[in-house]
Image (cartoon, rainbow, N blue to C red):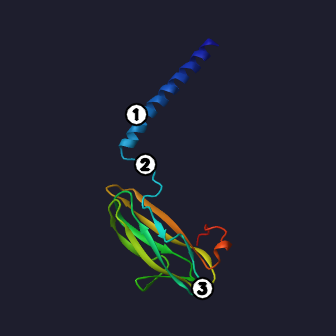
Amino acid sequence: MKKIGYLLIGLLIIGLISLFIYNTFFKQALIELGTPPLRTDIFRGNFSPTNRIFLSVNETKEVIFSISPDTDVSNTTTTFYFAPWIEVSKNGVKVNNGDTVWEGNLKKDDIVRLRIIVKTTEKTRVNLRASVEGYIANTTSHVELSYYALISTEKEGEWISPTRVV
């Protein structure tokens, strides 16, 4: 019976030493090898004047989508996705669903503002999605984030939630 007790105590000590070694050396080695910290919004994307766009059927509104990354980002693209009954144009040219409307490299805190015109051809309540993707400079870390603006022909008081994704 004593031998089993010694065995269990020995296994417990080995387990604690292993845990200490992992937390002290291995975890730190992973960080030093370049494991990037978790980021929530590297591009700091934003719709303005608001992410809730209220308009009447066949009315047009200018919407500005801007990005300003918190680090250098290369091969950056911005693409818009929207319902078929929504019309989007940039510089007077119609944008098709899924078209890339901007691409380039960005330095930390650079600001890119994309002015688009939004029009709905029928009563609706859907989201306009801006997808931004790129590579954190000098790494192979690929980042893709989506930003949403609610487009609605309903009165503001009738809005239930801006979470429907198209």
Q: Could you tell which of marks 2 and 1 lies nearer the N-terminus?
A: 1
Badge 3 or badge 2: first in the primary sequence: 2
Q: Secondary structure at mark 3?
A: loop
Quadrant where the N terminus sits is top right
Residue on which the image places disc 2: 37
Q: Residue at x 67, y 72 (%)?
A: 157
**Alpha carbons under labels 2 and 1: distance apart:** 18 Å
Whole-number angstrom distance, CA of label 3 to CA of label 1: 62 Å
User: In the picture provided, is 149 more to the left or to the right than 37?
Assistant: right
Q: Nearer the viewer, mark 2 or mark 1?
A: 2
Q: Which mark is residue 25?
A: 1
Q: Is residue 10 above or below residue 165?
A: above
Q: Which residue is mark 3?
A: 57
Mark 2: amino acid: Pro
**Does residue 119 sit above or below 27 in this rendering?**
below
Measured in 3D between alpha carbons, the distance from the residue under mark 3 to the one under mark 2, in whole angstroms, is 45 Å
- Please state which of residues 142 and 131 is positioned toward the viewer in this rendering: 131
